[in-house]
Image: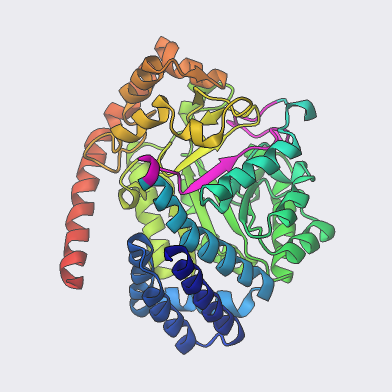
């Protein structure tokens, strides 16, 4: 009976979605949010919808962002976002995940990340993808079966990493086959051409995130000469077709001023990008000790969070800060709300945490999620009372060392081995954590005071 009711309510939601797609007025958008809230009995989804509705009513830039997105986006691209990402993943998928969690006393991740290939046409400074062959790829048959298992677990949103996701062109067949899923490839953005852009428009269920480290000087300086122009050309092709896409930026002490500047965000909006995902640079490349020289200082880490918050409140644009938004998701989400399957089928808790205890050559994804390694990581989260210090590798360095040792987790990359064995590198990470703590403590005190006032105002 419950499944029939969920199916009926989802059908009502899809009808509501169709109405919005055919009538994109601001009045209809408000009606959509108000009605969607009443259609679901799922608490977590209700909270999400209510929060979005409140922000929509109170924030003019958000209203402008949603209105412009509806007006400028290809109908199929919008339809797939609403039906696959919102409907299948956040609606019915959420119900399925909760039911499985309750039945098996577990915690399924919100999203799965997978690197079908580590091959790439670029070699960027600090990247953990280096020299790989086609034989190192996950077979297309295995990726297919993993998508099927993910859906059986209520996971309909998958982030595709690498390497370069569009280097493995067989993936397009899987995006088409799994037309009920939503895919977000994080791409270097240099391979877009007319044919690829047309295919993305035909399928509709793919939202690429192109990498930009700033303007030409910053992007080409890290990724190679001419890459910036290729990425901008690719964005132009996607914008012409009305496709949803965004930008990913690895933020270092060399480019933080640029990628968070008002001028840069305005350029991205003009180029058709709908969102930016900021990642503080992590020392996980071929030479992690040297990479620490590029990491953000304590003050710069906090400044990044402040600037991303300002972007969200002053621009018709959506921005996420992977580290500084941790207070909104109760700290570290590694192994809890997401996981990463690397090209060797090792199941890692995080794209930056290259450790594993299980391999999907001889285990199911569900079994890997329920390993002692993942269970302990979840039980330790959050790792401390300051949610602006979420990371188990650079903020709470004892955690990764203790859990890896206890569960005999093996490193899946040389930089990971150094993180738990190289005395000099470990000491450096401890220093980074120690230096950040007083700055983070002060920032988190201010964060809590600000959000307490907002909560009191709402109540």
Q: Coloring scheme of the render?
A: rainbow
Q: Which image quarter: residue 78?
A: bottom right
Question: Where does the image place residue 183, in percent across and percent down from the top left?
Answer: 62, 53
Instruction: Relative to 458, say whether 111 is above or below.
Output: above
Does 363 appear above or below 324? above
Residue at (53, 44) in percent of width and height: 112
Q: Which quadrant is home to the N terminus?
A: bottom left
Q: Nearer the viewer, residue 30 or 309?
A: 30
Q: What residue appears at the point 34 percent right and 49 percent down from the top-left corner? A: 329
The magenta stretch spans which residues?
Answer: 103-130
Query: Residue 444: within the magenta?
Result: no
- Expressed as whole percent of the image width and height from the top left, the position of residue 77 reads 66, 68
How many discs mark residues in the rendered view? 0
State the quadrant of the C terminus: bottom left
Q: x, y percentage for residue 359?
A: 58, 25
Q: Is residue 237 among what the camera can see? A: no
Please state which of residues 286 and 76 is positioned toward the viewer in this rendering.
Answer: 76
Q: Quadrant of residue 24?
A: bottom right
| Image quadrant assignment for residue 105 | top left
Is 94 on the left or on the right of 150, as rendered?
left
């Amino acid at each position: 009976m419950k499944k029939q009711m969920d199916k009926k309510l989802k059908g009502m939601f899809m009808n509501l979605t169709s109405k919005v797609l055919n009538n994109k007025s601001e009045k209809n958008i408000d009606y959509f949010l108000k009605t969607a809230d009443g259609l679901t009995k799922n608490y977590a989804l209700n909270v999400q919808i209510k929060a979005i509705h409140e922000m929509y009513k109170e924030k003019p830039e958000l209203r402008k962002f949603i209105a412009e997105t509806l007006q400028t986006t290809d109908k199929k691209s919008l339809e797939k976002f609403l039906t696959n990402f919102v409907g299948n993943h956040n609606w019915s998928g959420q119900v399925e995940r909760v039911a499985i969690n309750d039945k098996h006393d577990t915690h399924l991740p919100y999203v799965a990340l997978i690197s079908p290939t580590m091959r790439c046409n670029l070699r960027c400074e600090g990247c953990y993808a280096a020299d790989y062959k086609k034989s190192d790829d996950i077979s297309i048959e295995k990726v297919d079966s993993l998508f099927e298992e993910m859906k059986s677990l209520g996971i309909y949103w998958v982030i595709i990493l690498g390497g370069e996701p569009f280097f493995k062109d067989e993936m397009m067949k899987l995006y088409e086959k799994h037309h009920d899923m939503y895919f977000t490839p994080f791409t270097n953005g240099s391979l877009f051409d007319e044919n690829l852009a047309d295919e993305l428009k035909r399928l509709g269920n793919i939202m690429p995130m192109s990498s930009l480290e700033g303007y030409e000087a910053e992007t080409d300086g890290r990724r190679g000469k001419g890459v910036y122009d290729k990425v901008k050309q690719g964005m132009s092709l996607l914008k012409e077709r009305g496709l949803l896409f965004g930008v990913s930026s690895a933020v270092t002490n060399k480019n933080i001023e640029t990628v968070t500047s008002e001028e840069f965000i305005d350029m991205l909006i003009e180029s058709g990008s709908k969102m930016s995902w900021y990642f503080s640079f992590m020392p996980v490349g071929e030479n992690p000790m040297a990479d620490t020289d590029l990491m953000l200082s304590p003050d710069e880490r906090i400044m990044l969070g402040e600037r991303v918050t300002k972007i969200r409140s002053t621009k018709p644009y959506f921005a996420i800060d992977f580290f500084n938004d941790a207070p909104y998701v109760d700290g570290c989400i590694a192994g809890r709300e997401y996981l990463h399957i690397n090209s060797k089928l090792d199941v890692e808790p995080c794209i930056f945490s290259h450790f594993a205890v299980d391999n999907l050559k001889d285990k199911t994804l569900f079994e890997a999620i329920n390993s002692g390694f993942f269970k302990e990581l979840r039980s330790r989260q959050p790792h401390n009372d300051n949610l602006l210090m979420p990371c188990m590798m650079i903020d709470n360095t004892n955690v990764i060392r203790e859990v890896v040792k206890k569960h005999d987790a093996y490193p899946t990359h040389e930089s990971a081995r150094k993180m738990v064995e190289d005395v000099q590198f470990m000491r450096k990470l401890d220093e980074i954590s120690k230096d950040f703590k007083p700055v983070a403590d002060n920032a988190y005190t201010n964060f809590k005071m600000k959000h307490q006032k907002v909560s009191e105002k709402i109540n």
